Image: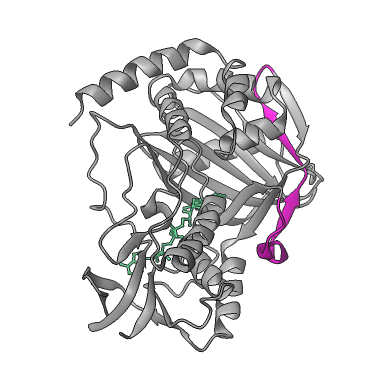
Amino acid sequence: MTYDFILLGAGAAGFSLALALVQSPLRDRRILIVDREAKNRNDRTWCFWTDQPSPLDAICYRVWDRIRFQTSRMDLCLPLAPYRYQMIRGIDFYRHARQTLAEFPNVQFTLGSVESVADGSDAAEVVVNGETQRAAWVFDSRLGPGDIQPNPLRYNYIKQHFTGWEIETADAAFDPESVTLFDLRTPQQNRVCFFYILPFSAHRALVEYTLFSPEVLLPDEYERQLKAYIGGRLGLRDYQVIEKEMGVIPMTDHPFPRRLGQRILATGTRGGRVKPSTGYAFARIHRDSRAIVESLLRADHPFDIPLDSRRHQMHDRLMLDVMAHEAGRVEYILEAIFAHNPIWRALRFLDDQTAPWEDLRLMSSVPPWPFLRAIWRVVRRLSKGA
Ligand SMILES: Cc1cc2nc3c(=O)[nH]c(=O)nc-3n(C[C@H](O)[C@H](O)[C@H](O)COP(=O)(O)OP(=O)(O)OC[C@H]3O[C@@H](n4cnc5c(N)ncnc54)[C@H](O)[C@@H]3O)c2cc1C
């Protein structure tokens, strides 16, 4: 046996699991991490809310204590306590992971594309750069185009797609204390679209045009919308674009099997860690890494991890269905959630942490008809689809 663990992909899931392993009693196991990229680019920023301290606090780029929620009818600025909204830049996370793992001679990296993965009863085999590596357990976070076969008769498939500009302005233009989570003051036109602003100072912010819809736009369209919003809504003429970010995150209730074989576990996006109705995954991935390590310690295999709660899966499925079929209603639903609930309840709900009574309180605050129609559509689809 060459390795105890092989981690395919050194993104959020791969590095998160590697860090959890070396911070546990399994720290001296032989670990191989494989990625086709050197991970030396700032290819994304991760944001998430939390009320807990974490070893990643040290690499947070920014932390905010307030969020802003805007529509044409309301403008709310909500203190987040006991939560905070944190941002970690991809490059800082990759660097931190590499530096931490460099202290462990039992952890090795291979730069290369995974050519094949073969399951077995005692070990799995991975071919990289023409060489075969064996391990007791393989954790796979690569998601290729053929990895899920869409079944639109049964599930909804939409995407969270966005382009962001980090801009610097000549005049003070932003409130550095509050993140604009949603600025929905833009025509919805049968798709959910909004602007998201992460202010780094009064003069600098990342402004993102984000949509939840089945198809992505042409690159020019995101840029046209960003220009119109920055010049129009924000009233800024004198600014420079310093950096750009773009991304596409799958939002679907399609099941992502965790167990890919006797010796292979899917992690990250591939393991269904993206929350279907929000696209947030980073905090869920870190919780999952801790659960995998606990399973290895307790059961001597990685599969004894908590299943997603059926109740929260149903919330996701209904919300996704409303987004896919009644996108124009989402603005009203979000207004009701943010205006009629304490922010901690909304965040706990969006994080699958709510108890049933909290769900009832939240659901009773939102317009019922879109959800009743969604229940009807979902039940019909689930009973019909193969
Ligand atoms: C631009 C962007 C911004 C996001 N922002 C947020 C956010 O703010 N908050 C949040 O919670 N979530 C966010 N997400 C969603 C989610 O957190 C990220 O997508 C996260 O990186 C998913 O982790 P992962 O490990 O599954 O995938 P990745 O981080 O993409 O890692 C997969 C790795 O596998 C490697 N790989 C793929 N195929 C192969 C192969 N054949 N051989 C070798 N290596 C391979 C890739 O190079 C990559 O490094 C964002 C996603 C994107 C795209």
Q: Position of residue 14 (x, y in %)?
A: 45, 66
| Residue 23 falls left or right of residue 149 | right
Residue range of the region highlighted in magenta in the rendering: 52-73
Work out whether 259 lies above or below 227. Answer: below
Q: Is residue 17 magenta?
A: no
Work out whether 149 lies above or below 358. Answer: below
| Residue closest to the far bottom | 105
| Residue closest to the far left | 386
Q: Residue at x 63, y 23 (%)?
A: 337
Q: Position of residue 129 (x, y in %)?
A: 27, 81
Of 338 and 348, nearer the camera is 348
| Residue closest to the far front | 298
| Residue 144 falls left or right of residue 296 | left
Q: Is residue 228 visible?
A: no
Work out whether 55 lies above or below 248. Answer: below
Q: Position of residue 314 (x, y in %)?
A: 42, 29
Of 236 and 142, nearer the camera is 142
> Ligand 1: which quarter?
bottom left
| Residue 260 falls left or right of residue 65 | left
Q: Is residue 66 magenta?
A: yes
Residue 212 appears in which quarter of the rendering? top left
- The N terminus, quarter of image: bottom left
Q: Residue at x 49, y 56 (%)?
A: 288
- The C terminus, quarter of image: top left
Q: Residue at x 43, y 25 (%)?
A: 318
Q: Residue at x 20, y 23 (%)?
A: 384
Q: Position of residue 69 (x, y in %)?
A: 68, 30
The colour scheme used to paint the residues is: one colour
